Amino acid sequence: MAFPINPVNNATYNDGTYTYKYNATFRTWSKIAQTTANIGNVVTVAGNVTTGNTSVTANTLSIGNTTVSSSNVTVGNTTVSGGNITVGTTTVSSANITVGNTTVSGGNITVGNTTVSSANITVGNTTVSGANITVGNTTVSGGNITVGTASISDTAISVGNSTLTGSNISFGNTTLSNSNLTIGTTTVSNSNLTVGATVVSSGNITVGNTSLSNTIVSANYLVSTAGCVAIGLGEIVVNNSTYDAGIFAATIGNINIGLSANIVLGSASGNVTVQNNLIANGTVTAANIAVSNLYSKRTSINVTTSTVVDQFPAATYRSAKYTIKVGDNTGYQAIEVLLVHDSINSIITIYGSLSTTGIDLVSLNSTITSGNVQLLATGLNAGTSLNLMGTYVPD
């Protein structure tokens, strides 16, 4: 049902079955009449309509204990007349609103012991006037606030032995002036921080007989919460016999060390542990390498005719061993190959081969070109690819 928007008082609306009247005071629509179509127990007598406990006369509509006349609306203990609304003990007239012990008149509001007048507000022992606020022993006037022993004036705040003036703050033995902060034996000035025997100046930190300057840092801890720590040409000495010495936080991203210099990690008797993968863009040189598993990181090569699948300097290595995987549109093959050269000729032998198709998928040969020993492959079927892992032995 869609009633009219923004109706005026006593406006009516008929939805085809019932007629409603709008009450602007309560902002409600009340049913005042209905048609006789499809209503079984409706009786019409000389201009009046009666159905159930509802009666409609010329100027009055009664539904149960609700009566709407030309000037009053009564619902239970609620009465709306021309200028008054009464709901139980609540009365709203043209000038006053009364709810229990609360009265709102033209210039005053009274709730129990609280009175709001045109200039004052009084709540118990609290009074708010045009210029003052008083709550117990607290007074707020035009320029001052007083709370017990505390006083706030235009230029100073005093609380017990604490005083805040235009340029100084004093609290017991603590004084903050325009350029210095003094707390007991600690003084912070424009350029120095002194805490007992510790002095921090613009370029140096001195803790007792320990000095942190531009060249040498010697201390138990060197901490930077953000940015970089620059140490010139000196060294960092970490002395700790109980716990691990951590340098970088877990939240640090990339760490670059010795981008153009050699780096020595660990000692002759100690181990260097890499927690995850160790990636080397160049050659890894080691006296011994012990591994649990050995993997190839090479990329598969598409093989057509006489494709170079590996090469190495002839002057560096004399022989090589290859483990090869071949795949094409028909199946897969695994091959083991030995290679040796005499700086002029290079020869190979296949001493192990397995094929899922029962036949070879690739042919292999070797040559020396421009000082490099090359391993070449020719695919025997369409879509041939090859990957390998090589081991090289020098003279």
Image (tube, rainbow, N blue to C red):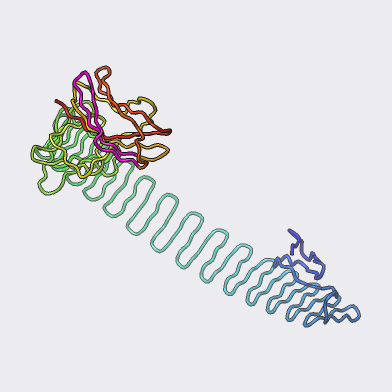
Viewer-closest of 142 and 232: 232
* Residue 202 in view here: no
Q: How many marks?
A: 0
Q: Residue furthest front?
A: 358
* Residue 26 in view here: yes
Q: Position of residue 236 (x, y in %)?
A: 14, 35
Q: Is residue 173 magenta?
A: no
- Residue 384 appears left or right of 172: right
- Residue 160 appears left or right of 219: right
Which quarter shows the N terminus? bottom right
The residue stretch that appears in magenta: 333-355
Q: Position of residue 8 (x, y in %)?
A: 77, 61
- Residue 86 appears left or right of 310: right
Q: Is residue 351 magenta?
A: yes
Residue at point 50%, 64% (across, down): 122
Using the image, determine if residue 342 lies above or below residue 154.
Answer: above
Q: Quadrant of residue 9?
A: bottom right
Viewer-closest of 265 and 215: 265
Q: Position of residue 102 (x, y in %)?
A: 58, 71
Viewer-closest of 203 and 353: 353
Q: Residue furthest right?
A: 46
